[in-house]
Amino acid sequence: MHSITLTIDSIDDILSLFDPSAPHFFVHRFDPQPAIGWFKADLDTSSGLNLKDAEVRGMQFDLQTDIEGIRKILVLNTSQLSIYQFARKVPDTLVLEYLPAQSRDKILQSNGLRHFFGIDFEFLTVESFDPDFIQAISENPMVRDRITRKES
């Protein structure tokens, strides 16, 4: 995969880089509460567990959403996020932890992965199978002066 790393000034920086032709977002191991502590949440599972105002902590899960969901997540100002942008929804059977390392990229690409966005505090790393996508980011006037690394 091709990659580029840059510093982030705002949420708009990140939002401007997403590919509008890939409408599905997968956030791996999303943690909505960065500090350990109890908070209230409604739980409704496909197995029939329905709890209103349950108190939970240490909650971490995979999340599928659209661009509006990503916008809301970015507003939380989470310091670390792994966002995968797909052309189609991630199937139930695709679990990142179960993918063999040597064929992980190929499996993800065959399931519609277009790009990966790794947010690590003030840095954003974008990886893509498409070198033109990375090149377009490097030429984007909003971010081109904040590139710290580019690899092909």
Image (cartoon, rainbow, N blue to C red):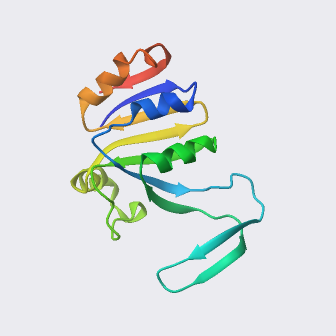
- Give the image location of residue 140, x and y in percent: 38, 18
- Give whichever of 105, 53 is nearer the camera: 53
> Residue at 29% across / 54% down in the picture?
108
> Residue at 56% across / 42% down in the picture?
74
Q: Is residue 68 above or below residue 12?
A: below
Q: Is residue 124 above or below residue 65?
A: above
- Give the image location of residue 22, x and y in percent: 30, 45
- Give whichever of 88, 121 is nearer the camera: 88
**Looking at the image, which residue sits at the far bottom?**
48
Callout count: 0
Q: Is residue 37 left or right of residue 78?
A: right
Q: Is residue 125 left or right of residue 120?
A: left
> Residue at 71% across / 74% down in the picture?
53
> Residue at 54% across / 30% down in the picture?
123
Give the position of the C terminus as an image quadrant: top left
- Give the image location of residue 136, x and y in percent: 31, 23
For the question of whether residue 59 can be seen, the reply is yes
Q: Is residue 63 left or right of residue 80?
A: left
Q: Is residue 136 left or right of residue 121?
A: left
Give the position of the N terminus as an image quadrant: top left
